[in-house]
Amino acid sequence: MVLSDLETGAVATVAAVQDAGPGDLVARRLRDIGFVDGETVRLVTRGPLGGEPLLVQVGFTRFAMRRQEAARVRLHRLEG
């Protein structure tokens, strides 16, 4: 599962960030802001126009991101 497919309000843990190639700056930035293996994330809400941007919470910090960026974050769904 990827972050862009997570339901609004759902919680999951980060499994990995997909690199598009060597020196991928987007993947590096996602890791730098907290999207690292085992970190808990929650999809807070989606924007009104085509579901963008996504408002995502990592720890106590919230980020707005495009679906294209969120699709690069692979997740493990938390049960319960």
Image (cartoon, grey):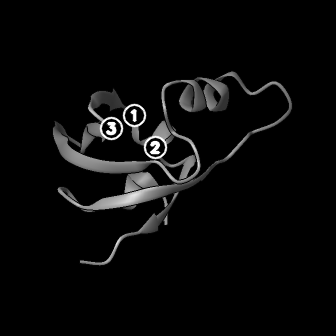
Q: Residue at x 31, y 78 (%)?
A: 79
- Where residue 70 appears, as percent x and y from the top left, is 46, 43
* Residue highlighted by disc 1: 66
| 3D distance between C-alphas at marks 2 and 3 | 16 Å
For marks 1 and 3 on the same chain, the one whose residue lies earlier in the sequence: 3
Q: Are marks 1 and 2 in contact (CB under 8 Å)?
A: yes
- In the rendered structure, find residue 59 and report the number of the disc placed on it: 3
| Residue position marked by numbered label 2 in the rendering | 70
Residue lying at 17% horizontally and 56% vertically, measured from the top left: 9
Residue at 27% of width from left, 29% of height from top?
A: 62
Mark 1 residue element: loop
Residue at the image position 44 percent from the left and 58 percent from the top: 13
Position of residue 14 measured from the top left corner of the image (x, y, whole percent): 51, 53
Instruction: Reply above or below: 34 against 29.
Output: below
- Foreground pick, 71 / 49: 71
Q: Depth check: 41 or 24 in front?
A: 41
Amino acid on which disc 1 is placed: Arg
Along the viewing direction, whichever of 6 and 58 lies nearer the viewer: 58
What amino acid does circle 2 point to? Ala
The answer to whether 16 is drawn above or below residue 26 in the figure is below
Identify the image quadrant of residue 63.
Answer: top left
CA gap, disc 1 and disc 3:
19 Å
Relative to 48, is 54 on the left or the right?
right
Q: Position of residue 39 (x, y in %)?
A: 46, 48
Report the mark closest to the observer, 1 or 3: 3
Q: Residues within 10 Å of mark 2 (few under 14, many from 20)?
A: many
Name the quadrant of the C terminus.
bottom left
Categorize mark 3 by other alpha carbons within 10 Å: few (<14), some (14-19), many (20+).
few
